[in-house]
Image (cartoon, rainbow, N blue to C red):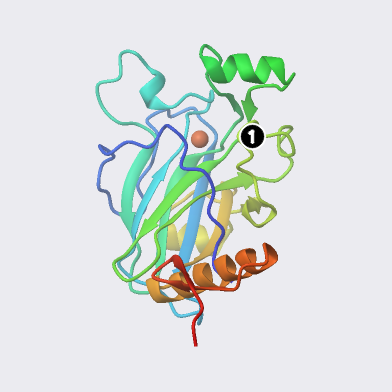
């Protein structure tokens, strides 16, 4: 099954540095580190090389670089590329929860609904390659206090991850200290064709539930005629 997508969120930018795998996402040397080791595969389990992997996250205090009024360069973000084995990796900080801004209409709405503004900690990913359906998603560490009450409803069970620890072998291979927290995840991309077929199938089913027997052609419903 392909990896589920989730919200893009407002903090993606287009000025992240293009970097090699192994890049350290944050400049804060004191932040608790998380080694993120991922692979990208297709629906048949084959590695997908040359995927552009755009990653971004807040800092160890829950703030994105764009929330800093003095920001003069990107921090906490990078654009990497999967290798011949479909693998990409980088060092992040352990994600922490953060409140979404409450000074606008969204804040007023959350107050009226008696909901808190705190998003559970997460790291964002956007994976793109020509011929594949672009995946915009995020990974959420299990056990976050806001895991079940995310104000933007971005958490999905398949995107909740358990951290492991970097062992001796990984430490040697990736030059990361033994004992560093480890996030290991395998993303699965659909081809454009597979995604189009699945959307068509699901749209048709949804229309059938409404009593409409329509075909889906190029993503649009058309009357089924013999
Ligand atoms: Fe976010």
Q: Is residue 1 rendered to the left or right of residue 24?
A: right
Q: Which residue: 43% across, 27% down?
A: 64
Q: Which residue: 48% across, 24% down?
A: 63
Mark 1 is surrounded, within 10 Å at the Cα level, by few (under 14), some (14 to 19) or many (20 or more) other residues, namely many
Q: Is residue 71 rendered to the left or right of residue 25?
A: left
Residue 159 image offset from top left, x and y in percent: 62, 53
Mark 1 residue element: loop
Q: Is residue 101 above or below residue 217?
A: above
Q: Which residue: 33% across, 63% down?
A: 51
* Circle 1 residue: 120
Residue 188 image offset from top left, x and y in percent: 50, 68
Q: Which residue: 69% across, 21% down?
A: 116
Q: Is residue 185 rendered to the left or right of residue 57?
A: right
Residue 104 image offset from top left, x and y in percent: 51, 14
Residue sitting nearer the eye, 64 or 111 = 111
Say if residue 190 shows up in the picture: no
């Amino acid at each position: 099954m392909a990896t589920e997508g989730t919200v893009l969120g407002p903090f993606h930018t287009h000025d992240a540095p293009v970097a090699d795998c192994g890049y350290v996402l944050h400049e804060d040397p004191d932040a608790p580190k998380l080694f993120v080791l991922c692979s990208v595969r297709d629906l048949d389990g084959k590695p997908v090389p040359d995927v552009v992997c755009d990653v971004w996250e807040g800092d160890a205090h829950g703030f994105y670089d764009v929330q800093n009024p003095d920001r003069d360069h990107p921090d906490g973000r990078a654009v990497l590329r999967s290798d011949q084995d479909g693998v990409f990796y980088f060092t992040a900080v352990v994600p922490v929860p953060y409140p979404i801004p409450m000074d606008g209409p969204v804040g007023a709405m959350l107050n009226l609904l008696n909901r808190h503004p705190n998003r559970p900690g997460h790291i964002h990913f956007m994976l793109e390659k020509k011929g594949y359906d672009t995946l915009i998603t995020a990974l959420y560490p299990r056990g976050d206090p806001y895991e079940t009450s995310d104000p933007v409803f971005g958490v999905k069970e398949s995107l909740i991850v358990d951290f492991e620890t970097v062992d001796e072998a990984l430490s040697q291979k990736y030059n990361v200290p033994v004992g560093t927290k480890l996030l290991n995840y395998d993303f699965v991309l659909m081809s454009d064709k597979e995604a189009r077929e699945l959307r068509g199938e699901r749209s048709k089913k949804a229309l059938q539930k409404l009593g409409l027997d329509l075909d889906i052609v190029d993503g649009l419903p058309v009357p089924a005629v013999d």
